[in-house]
Each structure stands twice: as C-alpha cells, then as structure tokens.
Image (tube, rainbow, N blue to C red):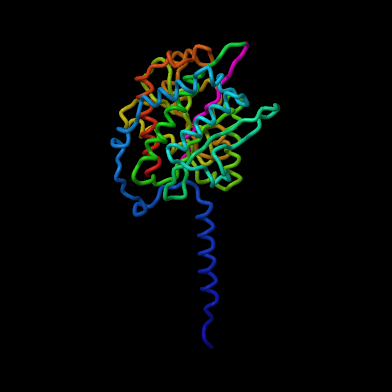
Amino acid sequence: MRPSCKGPILTLFMIIVLAGAATACAPWRRPAPQARRSQPNDFQEVWAAFDQAAVMQHLAELTSPAYTGRAVGSEGEAKAAAYIAAQLVSFGLRPWREIGLSGWEQGFSVADSRLEGHNIAGVIEGSSKQWLLLAAHYDHLGIQDGVLYPGADDNAAAVAISLEIARCLAQCSQPPLHNLAFVFLSGEEENLSGSRALAQQLREQGLAGRCRVVNLDMLGGTGGNSLDVWREPSQPSGAGLARQVMQAIKQAGLKTKSVRRRFAPVDSRAFARLGIPSVTLSWAYEARYHPDRHQASDTVEHLRPELLAKAARGVFHVVWVLSHS
C-alpha cells in the first residue's frame, strides 16, 4: 500500500493559512533589510525646500479674526477646515480612503452637546502596509465673552508646520517606505472628541495595529531649547517609538527630554487608549515658556520665529526617519 500524503499536505496547508492570518493582524514592524529601498532624496535635500515664510503665512491666516478662534462646531472651525483641505489638495495629497473617507473630512459629534466637528486628513502613499500619522489639532477656544482667543501656540503653529512638511514630502521623487497620513484634528479642547472619533474609526477599519502616531501640540512658545517628547502608555508599548523619536531629534542637532507631566490630556492619549503607540512633541514643554496658553494673548506676535524653525526641523526629521525605515 502506498503511504498517504494527506497528513503532510494538510499540515502544510494549515501552516500557510495561519501564517497569512498572522501577517494580516501583525502590528507595526520594521521591514526586512532587503525590503528597504534606497531614496534619491536625503533629508538635507528635502529640508532645504522647507519654507519658513509659508509656515508664518499659515499661522497668520489661521489666527486672524476671520477664523473666530476656531472653536469646534463654529463657523471659524469650518472655515479653518476648508483652508486646510485646500492646502492638501494643492500639495497633491489624496483623501484617506483606507479608513472609509471619500473626501477630506471625518465628521464627529461632541458628547453631551449639539456640537459637530470635523477632522481633516490627507495621505501620501508608501509601499508598506504600515501607517505613520502626523497629527495636530486645529481647534481652539473661539470667542468668549466677546474676546477672541487666536490660539497661535495652541495650536496653529503645529498645524502650520505640519502643512509645510506635507508640501515638502509630496514633492519627493519617490514616496516614503511607510504610508503617511497628515491628520488635522478638531475637538481637542472638547475632551479630545476628534481624536477619539478617528482612533475608533481606525479600529473599526482594522488599521489600528498598523499605525503609529506622532502628535504635535504647542510648538511655539517664548523660550527654551528642546523638542520634548511625551509618551502615552499603551499596549503594545510606545516605549520603542519614543526612543526612536528622541534619537531622531538628537540626530537633527536638537536637545530633547522625556516629559513626565503635562498641562492637560492631549490627542495622543485617544490613540494610545486603543493600543496605538503614540507620542506628543512640544517645544520646551514648561509653563514658563508658554505663558500665553489659553489666553487672548496667544498671538503670532508673541511667538519667536527662530524657535518655530528649530521645532520644525526636529519634527521634520522625526517624520523622515519614521517614514523611511
């Protein structure tokens, strides 16, 4: 009697099926060395295209009285969302179809209110299945008791820097290794409503295990000399991401430190709670360097352009390193 081969074939079939399932659910991982591609653009070349004047222009625009302080659910927020989306269109990004968006906006509701907000997202495609999110909230406090709160440091500065990084990377002759999503969140000032909605949608679409988040908050200020890193506790742990981010900041020639205490929760927390490794970057995160936080005096005039430029260089290098390795 010929020996049966059904047993070995069935075993091999099960191995293939299980390997495929493991790949589909695999968390963020670095590609094998042979999968990495050489890039014709190095960081110095791409950084040379960064336009500080464009950053200041975005800042001046978003903090002008026409945007009424960008409170979630306000006409000013809607106008800011339209402005940001128009920039992404002009840079050549595309909507984030992988999470179910056909356009640039993801609408959400603020709990225990009638407020409706909008996140804005645009994508630069890479060649892997991993996603790096560069996030910054664009909402602020609006007009209260007839007083305008422009929110330059908190958080138009980060939005402006993120927009200019998106423009520069969209011009690269080759795409990044990993997919890049430039995410502009609203509702941060309302219990992280926008980031909670986006994190939940990532989970529902099965992308949470393939994402990492670098959140930007308060990159202006009046002094200091370091780009600081806040790591959100998460499962899987974001410790490795934090170490990689701090190393990239140092390689950019800047000082950095780990932040142990924050003024208040930030959007990275919403992602970390759903198991997405997340960090927040802030310039010199000490209260004395951000005296205008949540004040009507948080204007462009109170920011120091040379510090914005340093923060921008550090953030850009972090994005470059994380998206190309």
Residue 76 screen position, x and y as percent: 57, 23
Q: Residue at x 40, y 22 (%)?
A: 56
Q: Residue at x 42, y 45 (%)?
A: 178
Q: Is residue 6 magenta?
A: no
Q: Quadrant of the C terminus?
A: top left
Residue 103 in the figure: left or right of residue 61: right
* 296 over 115 or under it: above or below: above
Residue range of the region highlighted in magenta in the rendering: 132-145
Residue 295 screen position, x and y as percent: 53, 13
* 127 over 77 or under it: above or below: below
Residue 52 screen position, x and y as percent: 36, 25
Residue 249 screen position, x and y as percent: 36, 31
Magenta: main secondary structure equals strand
* 209 over 161 or under it: above or below: below
Q: Quadrant of the N terminus?
A: bottom right
* 39 over 258 or under it: above or below: below
Residue that sits furthest to the bottom in the current view: 1
